[in-house]
Structures are given as structure tokens and as C-alpha cells.
Image: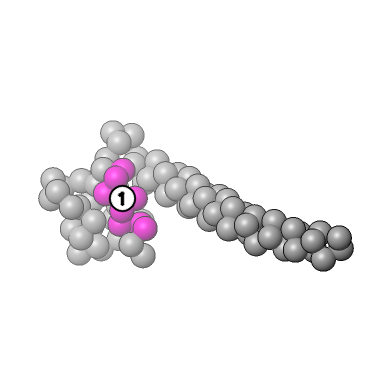
Amino acid sequence: MTNKLIAAGCLMALTAAPVFAEETVNAQDAAAQKAIASAFSEIDANHDMKINMEELSTKGVKLAKFKKADINNDGSLSEDEFVAYSREK
């Protein structure tokens, strides 16, 4: 009986561990996403939902990095472009 309880406990622990690990990763991902969104809002000085080179240069970002992040080459970074570039680092 005791061996069955121990085995059942081990099985529960082994199957629960991935769930807890996934929850931790999801929480970390959510925190990172929130930090990136906050940074985007802070840099977007005119609140037009895009970041231009002038806005980004106030944070010390060089033109080469801006161009790399500007995937569609429209001269500004959408939030999606900003998130993608931020996650690359």
C-alpha cells in the first residue's frame, strides 16, 4: 500500500512539473511583453503608434539598428517591428 502511494505521488510530481514550468515560462513571457510594450509607449513621444528615428535616437539607438528593425522600410517602427527586434536581442 505504501509503495503504491509513493508511486502515485511520484507520478503526480512528474506530470505536474511540466505544467508548473510552462506557467513560469508564460509568466516570464508576459512580463517581458509588458516591459516591451511599456518601452514602446515611452519611446513613442508623439503617441502615433509608431517610432521614428528621431524618437529612437533620443534613447541612443544608432541608425543601423533602426534600419535593421524597420522590416518594411517605411521609416518607422510599428509595435510589431519593435517587439520582433527587442526579442532578437
Residue under pointer 1: 82
Residue 48 in percent (x, y) is at 28, 33
> Relative to 6, does residue 41 appear above or below in the rendering?
above
Principal secondary structure, stretch drawn in magenta = helix
Quadrant where the N terminus is found in the figure:
bottom right
Query: Is residue 82 highlighted in magenta?
Result: yes
Which colour style is shown?
A: one colour
| The residue positioned farthest toward the top in the image shown | 48
| The residue positioned farthest toward the left in the image shown | 73
Identify which residue is drawn at 36% across, 58% down: 87
Q: Depth check: give the residue in front, 46 or 12.
A: 12
Disc 1 on helix, strand or loop?
helix
Please state if 64 lies on the left or on the right of 9 as rendered: left
Q: Is residue 35 visible?
A: no
Q: Which residues are magenta?
A: 79-87
Q: Amino acid at mark 1?
A: Phe
Q: Using the rendered view, name the quadrant where residue 78 is placed.
A: top left
Q: Is residue 83 visible?
A: yes
> Relative to 46, does residue 18 appear above or below in the rendering?
below
Residue 35 in percent (x, y) is at 47, 49
Residue 7 in percent (x, y) is at 75, 63
